[in-house]
Image (cartoon, grey):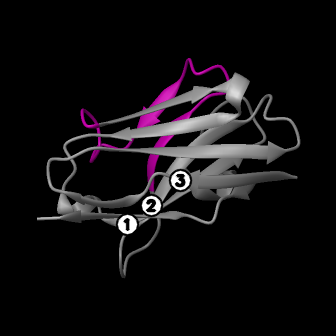
Amino acid sequence: QVQLVESGGGLVQAGGSLRLSCAASGRTFSGYAMGWFRQPPGKEREFVAAISWSGGITYLADSVKGRFMISRDNAKNTVYLQMNSLKPEDTAVYYCAARRDNYPSKLGDQYDYWGQGTQVTVSS
C-alpha cells in the first residue's frame, strides 16, 4: 500500500506560479511511475503530467506544455508539479497518483494509488 499526500495548492492570480508536492509513504516508492491529474469544477478528471521511475520519461498535457514541469526526488519519496503562467482554466482539484510500473501513463485507470487532492484556484 502506498499513501500519497498532496500539498502546495492555494489561490493565485493569473500569471502566477505554484509548486505542488506529493509525498509518498508506506510501501517502497521504488519502481513507481507517478502522475498528476486534475478535475476542474463540473468537469471530468483529466491528465496533466506524468514521470517515469527514473525521471527520464515525462509526459505533459498539451494544455500545460511550456508552463508546467513535473519532477521527482526519489530520495525524498516526493514528486513535484511546478506550475507557471497559471490561467483561470487551470483551476481544479489536483491529484497525485502512483503506478506500479516503471513507465508513466496518461490514463488514470492505469494508476493504482491516489491522493486526496489539493485545490488550485487561479483568479483572473
Q: Residue at x 28, y 59 (%)?
A: 90
- 66 magenta-colored: yes
Position of residue 51 in the picture relative to residue 100 (left or right): left
Q: Residue at x 78, y 41 (%)?
A: 100
| Amino acid type, label 1 | Ala
- Which quarter of the figure is the C terminus placed in? bottom left
Query: Counting residues from the N terminus, which is met first, the one under dot 3 or under dot 2?
Result: 3
| Amino acid type, label 3 | Ser
Of residues 103 and 81, the one nearer the viewer is: 81
| Camera-nearest label, 3 or 1 | 3
- 55 magenta-colored: yes
Q: Residue at x 53, y 44 (%)?
A: 21
Residue 92: mark in rendering: 1
Query: Counting residues from the N terminus, which is met first, the one under dot 3 or under dot 1?
Result: 3
Q: Which residue is mark 3?
A: 7
Q: Which residue is mark 2?
A: 38
Q: CA distance from mark 3 to mark 2?
A: 14 Å
Q: Given contact means CB atoms under 8 Å apart, are the residues at marks 3 and 2 in contact?
A: no
For label 3, the crowd category at 10 Å Cα-Cα, with few meaning under 14, some 14 to 19 and many 20 or more, is: some
Q: Given contact means CB atoms under 8 Å apart, are the residues at marks 1 and 2 in contact?
A: yes
Residue numbers of the magenta segment: 47-67
Q: Main secondary structure of the magenta part?
A: loop
- Regarding mark 1 in the picture, which secondary structure is present there? strand
Of residues 86 and 111, the one nearer the viewer is: 86
- Regarding mark 2 in the picture, which secondary structure is present there? strand
| Camera-nearest label, 3 or 2 | 3
